[in-house]
Image: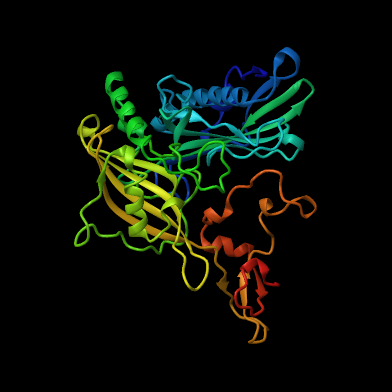
Amino acid sequence: MAKLTHPGKWPPTDVAEGTTPRAWLRYEWQYPGSRRPSRLISHPTVPYVTAARVGGADGEIDLAALSTAAEHYLKQLKHYVNATPPPLGRADPMLDLLADVAASGSLLHWCDIWPKINAEPSRLEGQIASWNMSRHPKSAMPGTVILVATEGIPDPMHGSFLMRFPSAGFRVPIEVRATDHGFDLIIRGLTAEFPGGSHQALSSLLAGRSDAEKQKVLSGLSRSLSGVPLGFQAGVAPATLVASSETDTGDAPVEAAVSDDASSATSPPPSDTSSVPPTPQTDAQPAARSSVYRMITMLEDDIAKQADVVPKSLLLQDIRFSAQPENVTDGAWDITLTLLARGQDTPRGEPVSYRLTVRVRLAEPGANEVELLSVTRVPLVSHAVAGTGGPLPPPLPFVRVFPVPPPDWRAPSGRVPPHPAPPLAWRRPTRPDIILDLFRENRAIGLGRGLKMQQLSL
């Protein structure tokens, strides 16, 4: 790790005492457009700057250096915002949660950096990371790293991995700027978002519990969730469908939320909300019950049958929790699984992919019975929308398309990239359609049956 020199006091005294917070600090108590507990904090004119010396005995810029700088920043931000009297008019309990990210009992954990700094390209392990935005060879610094922390618990089947909950976490963008003696690590704000509605963060559910109660719940959940072998396996290409117990999961902190939103901190809610209603559990077969260690052979098949998808294609993306405060340690827990899946083959062409929302109930954390409550599916569609009219002849209909391919669709000199790109086929657009349409243009599409979209001449 690089040798770091942190600011002695931040914000500086003349800023903290000489001006009102509104003059330099944007503090959104609810992230614009979010329907869940969230924060947007920005102070571009008063950045937090940590000096980093590198080389030789001083080490290099790595996750340890960046996370240490972020942790010092979070503590000083908390001390400022939650001072007595609070400069913003009220204290913010969410900052207590974020600032404790390095504490031994915290359920928040920093994500590894990807692509790795000063390293050959490698595949993304899992589905979430601290994103290295450097454009230099081997992703070297200087550059920008978006440091990401999520909630997670140890996976007993993969001792070196965490089962992460990506819908509960926060991001700290850090600009790494070159100096004569190394680098400056510059922080200008953060964003945070946690589940809302009927779902809670583990940090919130376990707040105020004794160490023994926390350990009982966490060990029980670890046993239960390790029996859900769905999702991306660490070290396996994301495009490969595998059975794994590494599961990314999500939860939330302290405030009440406006709605029960299924989007994640890393993926804002989709604009297309049309969905197939939950599959009823009555008048068909009894609710599926199974040992948690047999979910791959029983619940998966039952989920796939009700959603009309290919069983072995299920990829677990997120897990959210809900429990009554009085039942946290001994009562039933409702768990919501977010999965991706491929639809069954159809006579008309390739199947559609779906996002599944699956609700199950544990009798208690670590129990050997799981009840399947409901299955809801939403199609994952990369769609072209009808245009507003134009001077195109009737035989050549036109659509609104994105004229510039995403960066990970392109390779140098037309070659295939040397490492797998993020699987765009498994993603939904994360912005509202009114925003997406700003990037589309009218294109005529020639008539051609049996051709895939990328084979058509635009």
Residue 45, position in %: x, y?
63, 35
Identify the image's colour scheme: rainbow, by chain, secondary structure or one colour: rainbow
- State the quadrant of the C terminus: bottom right
Numbered label tally? 0
Residue 296, position in %: x, y?
37, 44
Residue 233 or 145: which is nearer the viewer?
233
Give the residue at x 33% y 26%.
219
Eyeballing the image, is 211 above or below 427?
above
Residue 118 or 447: which is nearer the viewer?
447
Residue 161, position in %: x, y?
48, 29
Eyeballing the image, is 304 above or below 348?
above
Give the residue at x 50% y 23%.
75
Is residue 454 visible in the rendered image? The answer is yes
Residue furthest top as drawn:
57
- State the quadrant of the N terminus: top right
Give the residue at x 66% y 33%.
116
Is residue 22 visible in the rendered image? The answer is no
Residue 131, position in %: x, y?
61, 38
Residue furthest front as drawn:
297
Residue 427 or 281: which is nearer the viewer?
281
Q: Quadrant of residue 2?
A: top right
34 left or right of 423?
left
